[in-house]
Image: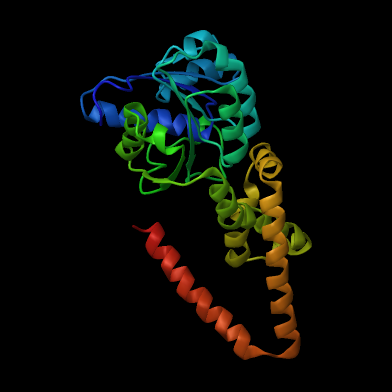
Amino acid sequence: MTKEQIKSISIIGLGLIGTSLARAWQAAFEAEGRKLFISGYDNNFANKDKKEILNYGLNRFESDFQYLCAVDLVVLAAPVQENIKTLRKIKRFLKPKTLVVDASSTKQAIMDVAKELDVRFVGMHPIAGSELRGYQNSNPDLFRGKPVAICADEKLLKQAKVKDFQALMELIGAEPFVVDAASHDKIFAKISHLPQLLSTAIVNYCAEDLDKAGTGLQDMARLSGSAWLVWQDIFATNQTEIADVLAAFSQKLQSLSNDIRAGNYEAIEQEFQSGNENYQKLQKRTQQ
């Protein structure tokens, strides 16, 4: 890690991801005998939450945005459209030294706004999470062994504070990789947004027979417990890519339907073989 770059952090949005980051960073710094001061804010918190959150990695709950921006690093960890609103709101308070990152699941929309506002900004997407939500379900090990997408131009990536931020993510066990925003949104429409929609559609399609379902449907339906509050923003900020992926996948389903109806079991067997092989690849990746 570069010297003396990030010692104070503000996290705006104290749900699962934001609070897990706070807990992970505090634990990592404590293990190395270093001090890190983390402030945070969440506009959905009641008074009891403001007190309780101090047991989850925060040194201070603060609603003053000028105070929150007087730090080395600001993390926007709410849903993407809320993050965009916050970015516009805090622009006037940001210090030249302050780096802003977000933890949104789509990247192009917020990075366009950051460029418009001329904010020193890095897009981040931790490929980690849960169908559970809220700071009470936070986990300091949530990011361990998980990829983290980093989106920024080459010039910014060479800056010491940005390198220090990437080192912060590595410190908590994450595996940063660099990708441009457009490619990110196209890739994750396929490997993240499509599975969510399929899980939701399947459990709703089978709703009348859920009392007879076993673990197979439960496995497929896990993502259907995800929060609409998060996903409505994802769909709104990546609608073209998601719609294109759904259209392409519907053709895949139609092809399977045609093969089943025609008794073309060789083609279906090939699908199973490919599925088995790709599942093993996925298992190896997720177990590393």
Residue 265 image offset from top left, x and y in percent: 64, 89
Left or right for 244, reference 32: right
Q: Quadrant of the N terminus?
A: top left
Instruction: Report the residue that reaches farthest toward the right.
Output: 208
In the depicted structure, whether residue 211 falls above or below residue 259: above
Q: How is the image coloured?
A: rainbow
Q: Can you see residue 1?
A: yes
How many numbered marks have been drawn onto this rendered protein structure?
0
Instruction: Report the residue that reaches farthest toward the front.
Output: 155
Residue sitting nearer the eye, 29 or 76: 76
Q: What residue do we see at 76% from left, 61% from top?
A: 205
In the depicted structure, whether residue 79 falls above or below residue 12: below
In the depicted structure, whether residue 134 falls above or below residue 236: above
Q: Can you see residue 44?
A: no
Left or right for 215, reference 231: left
Residue 228 image offset from top left, x and y in percent: 69, 41
In the depicted structure, whether residue 53 falls above or below residue 110: above
Instruction: Report the residue that reaches farthest toward the left.
Output: 33
Residue 182 image offset from top left, x and y in percent: 57, 47
Left or right for 193, reference 38: right
Q: Quadrant of the C terminus?
A: bottom left
Tell me where residue 222 sits by quadrant. Answer: bottom right
Q: What residue do we see at 71% from left, 90% from top?
A: 263
Tell me where residue 174 sits by quadrant. Answer: top left
Q: What residue do we see at 76% from left, 86% from top?
A: 261
Residue sitting nearer the eye, 280 or 91: 91
Residue 243 image offset from top left, x and y in percent: 72, 54
